Image (cartoon, helix red, strand yellow):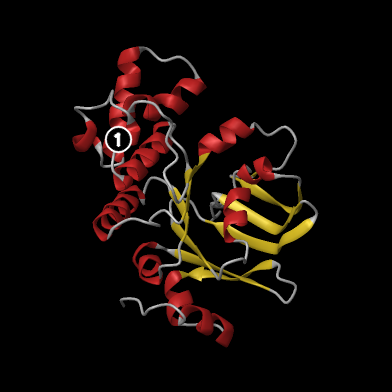
Amino acid sequence: MNMIKIIPAISVKNFGFYYNQQKVLDNVSMDIPQNKIIAIIGPSGCGKSTFLKSLNRMSDLEGEIQIEGKIEFFGQNIYERRINLNRLRRQISTIYSKPHLFPLSIYDNVAYGVKLIGWRPKPELDEVVELALKAADIWEEVKNKLHKSALELGYGEQQRLCIARALAVKPQVILMDELCAGLDPIAIMKIEELIECLRSELTIIFISHNMQQVSRLADFTALFQYNENHIGQLREFASTKKILAQYTDYSIRDYVTSYPRFSK
């Protein structure tokens, strides 16, 4: 009986990364499964954000880069010359630690990326905006003020609006860099509930220093550390339960237990 080969959403193979000729990441390899939630943890300066930005080549915008190895998105090497970067960044969308909204209306913020893809009739665009806001669990809060400035929203609402804008272009992967930084506990709970709702539809990769959050949300966890030359490396990629409860060596144990204890 033939087994069906499951292609990972993202496959990272012997990946190394240089910013302006300085090596930041070395020999990172992992297969990220589709429609799972992956946490990235590790001490400051170990390359977590650089790795996240390399997954949709947002790092290209920050300086001269060089890479080793490759990153494949459903089998296609994203560092090939012929790759369409605009389409890649729609398919693998980034949500930053601070809301990045345009000085436009709530409606126009959500519709922005959709309009870039191509013209849509107004009724169709209205539907896309509504569905995205509902998917981001913010529709009820903004449905009567869609044409007011998005910058008038509260911080947590702005972050969920950024999620709605990302969802509007129907990505397959969402990257989240410290999504809940600066949010109050109620706003964090709303974001985590939203991530849970999106679990079956998207691959979500997020950076967090909150081990309770990692234990609540992540199916798999990637632990990054840096070596004696201060170059980031992947130390372990495994189920979150294994990373948090069955440490493979004392260096992982020392890292994980440096955080407040997480709920079992």
Residue positioned 41% across, 63% down in the render: 218
Residue 155 at x, y = what percent?
Answer: 32, 46
Q: Is residue 174 above or below residue 108?
A: below
Outermost residue, top side: 121
Left or right of 246: which side holds 62?
Answer: right
Q: What's the residue type where badge 1 is placed?
A: Glu
Determine which quarter of the picture holds residue 62: top right
Residue 102 at x, y = what percent?
Answer: 43, 31
Whether residue 7 is visible here, answered yes or no, is no
* Mark 1 residue crowding within 10 angstroms, few (<14) / some (14–19) / many (20+): few
Q: Quadrant of the C terminus?
A: bottom left
Residue positioned 42% across, 46% down in the render: 202
Residue positioned 55% across, 83% down in the render: 248
The one nearer the camera, 90 or 143, is: 143
Q: Is residue 115 above or below residue 86?
A: above
Residue positioned 71% across, 43% down in the render: 79
Residue 31 at x, y = what percent?
Answer: 58, 58
The local secondary structure at tag 1 comes to helix
Find disc 1 in the rendering and name its residue: 152
Outermost residue, right side: 21
Q: Is residue 134 above or below residue 159?
A: above
Left or right of 240: which side holds 150?
Answer: left
Left or right of 168: which side holds 54?
Answer: right
